[in-house]
Image: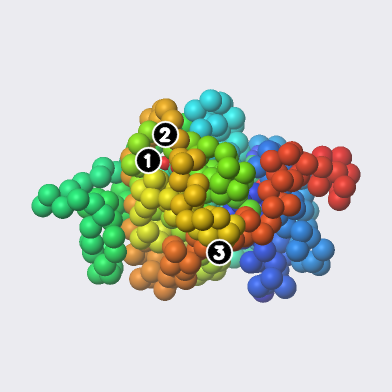
Amino acid sequence: MNKTIIITGGAGFIGSHVVRLFVDKYPDCRIINVDKLTYAGNLANLKDVEDRPNYRFVKADICDFEAMRTLMEAERVDGIIHLAAESHVDRSIRDPFTFARTNVLGTLSLLQAAKEYWESLPEGYSGKRFYHISTDEVYGALELTHPEGIEPPFTTKASSGKHHLAYGDTFFYETTRYNPHSPYSASKASSDHFVRAFHDTYGMPVIVTNCSNNYGPYQFPEKLIPLFINNIRHRKPLPVYGKGENVRDWLYVEDHARAIDLIFHKGKDAETYNIGGFNEWKNIDIVKVLVRTADRLLGRSEDEDMGLITYVTDRKGHDMRYAIDSTKLQRELGWEPSLQFEEGIEKTVRWYLDNQEWMDMVTSGEYMKYYDGMYGKR
Ligand code: NAD
Ligand code: TYD
């Protein structure tokens, strides 16, 4: 195969799992991790693969068009898997400009660099692929519904015909109209449109996937699950927004990484695939599972820390429900999530409790020095 693939945002949460999977699984491919190392980038996430001969880290900003263009030519890049982004909704509410810059202009800069480089080759776009990782949040928010007066969650049937529990009878499909509400989702929606426009205008071979909420090891502890696990450990309050009634559809991060691998290699150009686990949970129920699991693993008495749950002012414009229908991916490419949520949550809580050193390094800000020690100035 001997392909050279750029993975952007590889020092972040999902990106680090994708880099690890590709470096391990494709020893004949060169994997180049391009990451600016913002607050969310942590090279310690990739400690186990940093010395592999088929891996290279490049500290760069995707918004730097010249740097991207030069790198693609120097490395003769065949494929790009683009995960670099500002990813936290609460930060986007406080500072939308940073989201527009990285998510919109950064994506455009990568697209234009890839276009110029690939169009300069005798073979043009043949054998090339630009794969853009997006989110279900671009579709907007779904309602909690009560068909025939039944209190959710109720059993429903996906378009695949499989039964699962849901909090409403509507879902996000690949054909659902974009309707983003937060500055984060608006910036991701805009970047998705640019990616598709590069296919329609220049014929660039692109793929876009929209995935639901991920959870698992190495997630930055500003997001619900790692933040709350760490707070339970230290007996700090668990700030639940609003009434905790909002519903998210959760997928174990390694299942997302496997889907990305499959789609990068087997997906069809210009297609969109939804990725999700048919796994809807109300926030407050997740928080209770986290408390129970952490208390058990920490040897505390049952439900000892339920009192840490604190209802706080709701997030502005808080989307009520996300629910992805990933039937197309399951039917066309045979992907299935491998973990049940109960199993994934147990693994995740255990990982954060066992890796307190990683958590302390992140919460103290020490992780920012990892790059200094390894590679010179950050
Ligand atoms: P993350 O915030 O953990 O990591 C983002 C990474 O991008 C960091 O390493 C950061 O340093 C890097 N980065 C940020 N700005 C950059 C820039 N200008 N140039 C180069 N690198 C830059 O994010 P994540 O949760 O791993 O999400 C990765 C991607 O997946 C994002 O595009 C996000 O929108 C998408 N996504 C995330 C989820 C989720 O639940 N986390 C779900 C669906 C889709
Ligand atoms: P988050 O992990 O930020 O992901 P997203 O906003 O992309 O879905 O939040 C998941 C859910 O948890 C979301 O409904 C907001 C809620 N939440 C809280 O209730 N308290 C918190 O401290 C955080 C970070 C999130």
- Structure colour scheme: rainbow
Q: Which mark is residue 244?
A: 1
Report x, y in % for residue 271. Answer: 42, 58
- Disc assigned to residue 204: none
Location of the N terminus by quadrant is: bottom right
Q: CA distance from mark 3 to mark 1?
A: 23 Å
Q: Residue at x 45, y 35 (%)?
A: 310
Label 2 or label 3, whichever lies nearer to me, is 2
- The yes-or-no answer for disc 1 within 8 Å of ligand 2 is yes
Q: Residue at x 54, y 67 (%)?
A: 258
The picture places residue 301, in percent across and down from the top left corner, at 51, 55
On screen, residue 212 versus residue 118, left or right, reads left
Q: Secondary structure at mark 2?
A: strand
Report which quarter residue 100 is drawn in. top right
The answer for how far apart the CA atoms under marks 2 and 3 are is 27 Å
Q: Nearer the viewer, residue 147 or 140?
A: 147
Camera sees residue 236: yes
Residue of label 3: 347
Estimate the spatial distance between the alpha carbons at disc 2 and disc 1, rounded to whole Å: 8 Å
Q: Which mark is residue 311?
A: 2
Q: Which residue is most to the left? A: 148
Label 1 residue SS: loop
Q: Is residue 173 left or right of residue 127?
A: left
Which one is in front, 161 or 290? 290
Mark 2 / mark 1, whichever is N-terminal:
1
Q: Amino acid at mark 2?
A: Tyr
> Which of the two marks, 2 or 1, is nearer to us in this view?
2
Contact check, label 2 and label 1, Cβ < 8 Å: yes
Name the spot of residue 367 as percent of width and height, x first.
76, 44
What is the quadrant of residue 98 in the picture? top right
Question: Mark 3 or mark 1: which comes first in sequence?
Answer: 1
